[in-house]
Image (tube, grey):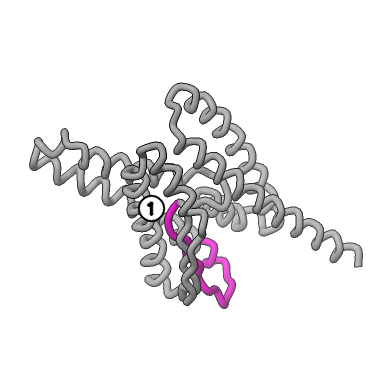
Amino acid sequence: MSIKIDLKIFLFLFLFLLTSQLEIYIVLMVFAIIHELGHLVAGLILKFKPTELKLTPFGLQIRFNIDYYNKELHIQKAIIVLAGSLTNFLIATIIIIFAKFNVSIENTYIYQLIVYSNFLIGIFNLIPIYPMDGGRVLKELLKIILGAKKAYKLTYIISKTVLIILTAISSIAILYLQNIAIVLIIGYLWYLEVLEIRKYNKRKNIEKLVNNI
């Protein structure tokens, strides 16, 4: 299994340090990594072999080796993807339940930071933008219903539409909150989207060549 580090993580660390938000970023990174470990555990339970771990500005990325194909594979992949957000929701729920037995904890900064961070990461990852978790689940479910070709196309359309809407909403939030984190997140999502657009267009060109032969 290979281990890689995305060097853009150091740029993010530097920018958050300049804006005095380094503590928040580190906390988010910790729970983002735990989020990915949820994927890893689910994959191992389903007997998938991890082939790559990559540390990115938003946590870990895990790739599994898939050496077979059947209809159940799409469900299994969706379960692995959902396991990440479920891990964050589980952590937040446990902390909330624990706090109920100690009322003083509910008002502490650490308690609020842990709960909000996990809910934020869990919900954010479920947004249907590919290649985020929500987009991956959407693609796998659409493959079952529509087949691979139509699933890729519809996932691409939905992903781009949601990202445009999210960018518009975030632009308003940036004006009021003036938070660099929002700018970085939206910018990184568009970077991922551009990469996926290139892959999608490459796939379409290959299909055209095959159809013309």
Q: Where is residue 138 shown, x and y percent of the image?
A: 55, 50
Which image quadrant for residue 18? top left
Q: In the shown orientation, is residue 21 left or right of residue 180?
A: left
Q: Position of residue 13 (x, y in %)?
A: 42, 49
Q: Which kind of residue does numbered mark 1 sit on? A: Ala
Q: State whether residue 150 appears in this view.
A: yes
Which stretch is magenta? 58-75
Residue nearest the viewer, comparing 76 with 171: 171
- Which residue shows up at 45% across the image and 22% down it? 176
Q: Position of residue 185 (x, y in %)?
A: 50, 42
Identify residue for label 1: 32
Identify which residue is drawn at 46% across, 73% down.
50
68 displayed left or right of 96 = right
Within 10 Å of disc 1 (Cα), the crowding (few <14, some 14-19, many 20+) is many
Front one among 24 and 166? 24
Which element is circle 1 on? helix
